[in-house]
Image (cartoon, rainbow, N blue to C red):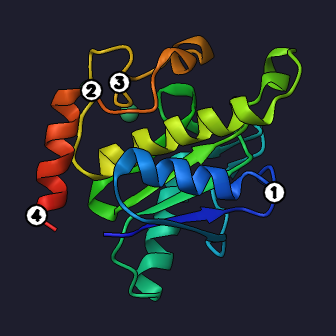
């Protein structure tokens, strides 16, 4: 398996290489970052947000068109929502092998704190690996330090470690072994 990370042109630049390396290390599979060519769909004017489901659809269309069967993680700057949630850090659809992460709420600046690239890289990799975990069939985990724990706040995201807990790691290994 190989993970494709599509980096949108509006996303914070200069972080691609560390994000690629760290996500690859967390997941235990190779990952490649490239420029995004998926159409950015689903912008809702009144909310100033993107409907994450529409974006996943767009990724699916792209994957079909390019006969791409491996998992895709799209990194965008725009804020995301999903029906019933005022916002989401990211979203994944296992059947499509498609996931998206937004950097909108991952930077310190959003919370009135001083910006820091290392913090931003940390959060993008944790959130990205979380969504990729869903693509590998993993559900949410109760272990607050595990990648598969579902954070509601930035602090909860920061509290997580850049690793799967032993139980989730085992499930991930079983999934990867299936090919
Ligand atoms: Zn999740
Ligand atoms: Zn876990």
Q: Are marks 3 and 1 in contact (CB under 8 Å)?
A: no
Badge 3, how many Cα within 10 Å: few under 14, some, many 20+?
many
Q: Quadrant of residue 67?
A: bottom left
Q: Which residue is mark 1?
A: 10
First in sequence: mark 3 vs mark 1: 1
Q: Which residue is mark 4?
A: 178
Indicate whether 153 appears above or below 37. Answer: above
First in sequence: mark 1 vs mark 4: 1
User: Where residue 135 sits: x, y (%)?
Assistant: 31, 52
- What secondary structure is found at the residue carrying circle 4? loop
Q: What is the distance, in whole Å, between disc 3 and disc 1 at their CAs?
A: 29 Å
In front: label 3 or label 1: 3
Residue found at x 57% / y 19%: 158
Q: Quadrant of residue 63?
A: bottom left
Q: Quadrant of ligand 1?
A: top left
First in sequence: mark 2 vs mark 4: 2
User: Where residue 52 sits: x, y (%)?
Assistant: 54, 47
Q: What is the distance, in whole Å, between disc 1 and disc 4 at their CAs?
A: 36 Å
In front: label 2 or label 4: 2
**Taking 26 as reference, is 156 left or right?**
right
**Taking 95 as reference, is 7 left or right?**
right
Q: Is mark 1 within 8 Å of ligand 1?
A: no
Q: Which residue is mark 2?
A: 165
Residue found at x 58% / y 36%: 81
Badge 4, how many Cα within 10 Å: few under 14, some, many 20+?
few
Q: Is mark 3 within 8 Å of ligand 2?
A: yes
In front: label 1 or label 4: 4
Q: Are marks 2 and 3 in contact (CB under 8 Å)?
A: yes
User: Where residue 10 sits: x, y (%)?
Assistant: 81, 57
Q: What is the distance, in whole Å, between disc 1 and disc 2 at their CAs?
A: 33 Å
Q: Are marks 1 and 4 in contact (CB under 8 Å)?
A: no
């Amino acid at each position: 398996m190989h993970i494709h990370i599509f980096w949108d042109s509006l996303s914070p630049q200069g972080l691609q290489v560390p994000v690629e390396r760290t996500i690859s290390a967390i997941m235990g599979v190779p990952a490649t970052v490239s420029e995004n060519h998926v159409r950015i769909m689903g912008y809702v004017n009144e909310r100033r947000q993107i409907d994450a489901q529409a974006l996943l659809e767009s990724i699916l269309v792209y994957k079909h068109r390019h006969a791409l069967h491996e998992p895709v993680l799209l990194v965008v700057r725009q804020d995301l929502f999903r029906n019933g949630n005022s916002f989401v850090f990211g979203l994944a659809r296992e059947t499509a092998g498609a996931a998206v992460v937004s950097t909108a709420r991952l930077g310190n600046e959003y919370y009135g704190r001083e910006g820091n690239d290392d913090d931003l890289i940390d959060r993008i990799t944790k959130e990205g690996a979380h969504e990729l975990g869903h693509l590998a069939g993993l559900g949410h985990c109760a272990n607050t330090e595990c990648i598969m724990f579902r954070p509601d706040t930035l602090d909860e995201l920061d509290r997580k470690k850049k690793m799967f807990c032993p139980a989730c790691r085992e499930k991930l290994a079983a999934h990867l072994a299936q090919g």
